[in-house]
Image: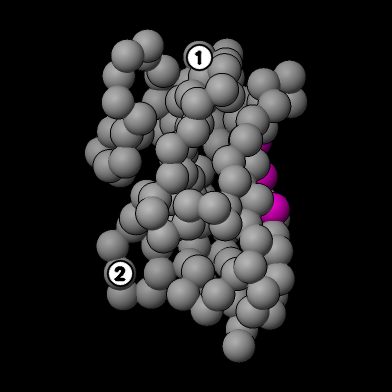
Amino acid sequence: QVQLVESGGGLVQVGDSLRLSCVASGRTFSLFRVAWFRQAPRKEREFVATINRSGDSTYYAESVKGVFTISRDNAKNTVYLQMNNLKPEDTAVYYCAARYGMRGRPPGVLTSEYPYWGQGTQVTVSS
C-alpha cells in the first residue's frame, strides 16, 4: 500500500509555469514507478508522464514532451511535475499514480496499470 497526495495546482495565465508535487506515504517509495495523468472536463483520463524507481528514466506523452518535466526525490518521497508554457488545453485535474516498479517492464501509459492513486489537484489555465 502507498498513499499519494498531490498539491501545487491552481489558476494561472497562458504561458505561466506550475510545479505539481506528489507526496507518498506507506511502503518504501523507491520501489514504485510513478506517473502523472490528467483529466479534462468531459474527457477520458490521459497519460502525461512517468518516471522509474530510481529517477533515471522518464517517458512523456507527445503532447507535453519538451514542455513538462517529471522528476523525483526519493529521500523526500516526492515526485514532481514541472509544467512550463501552460496553455488552456492543459486545464485538467492532475492525478499522481503509482505501481511497483519492475525492471524491463514497459513504462506504463494506461490507467489500469496503476493501482494506487491520489485525489488530484486542479490546474486551470486562463486565456
Disc 1 secondary structure class: helix
Question: Does 74 appear in magenta?
Answer: no
Q: Which residue is mark 1?
A: 31
Circle on res. 78? none
In this picture, which residue range is highlighted in magenta?
19-23
Q: Which residue is mark 2?
A: 43
Mark 2, Cα crowd under 10 Å, few <14 / some 14-19 / many 20+, is few
Disc 2 secondary structure class: loop
Task: Identify which amino acid the numbered label 2 is placed on.
Answer: Lys
Q: Can residue 58 be spotted in the picture?
A: yes
Task: Identify which amino acid the numbered label 1 is placed on.
Answer: Leu
Q: Can residue 27 be spotted in the picture?
A: no
Above or below residue 14? Residue 80 is above
Quadrant holding the C terminus: bottom right
Residue 1 is situated, as x and y percent measured from the top left of the image, at 46, 21
Q: Give the left or right position of residue 61, taking residue 20 as reference.
A: left
Above or below residue 15? Residue 57 is above
